[in-house]
Amino acid sequence: MIEVLVNDRLGKKVRAKCLEDDLVGDLKKVLALQLGTHANKITLQKGGTTLKDHISLGDYEIHDGTNLELYYV
């Protein structure tokens, strides 16, 4: 189990617990529930790279304590 920190650059920081085997799309669903929005309205980035929904967090080298940027589409 890992904890990912997400910053939406509007002052809101969210922590989400997930597995490294989870897909980015699964993480977006967890974040959508916490933020009260739809998962398809969320875009996640790590170091300027937009994360694709069908790739696992481990493939993007997202580990415990990783910071991601969240943008609303």
Image: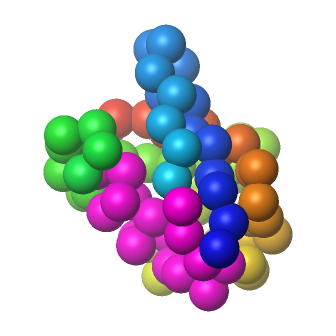
Rendered-image quadrant of the C terminus: top left
User: How far from the left and from the top, in percent, is residue 59?
Assistant: 74, 80
Is residue 68 rendered to the left or right of residue 24? Answer: right
Q: Is residue 55 visible?
A: no
Above or below, 11 relative to 54: above
Residue drawn at x 52%, y 28% is 13
User: How far from the left and from the top, in percent, is residue 5?
Assistant: 63, 43
Give the extent of the magenta segment. Answer: 17-32
How many badges with numbers are in the image?
A: 0
Residue drawn at x 75%, y 50% is 66
**Closer to us: 47 or 3:** 3
**Which picture quadrant has residue 15?**
top right
Is residue 61 rendered to the left or right of residue 52? Answer: right
Residue drawn at x 34%, y 35% is 72
The colour scheme used here is rainbow
Is residue 33 on the magenta stretch? no
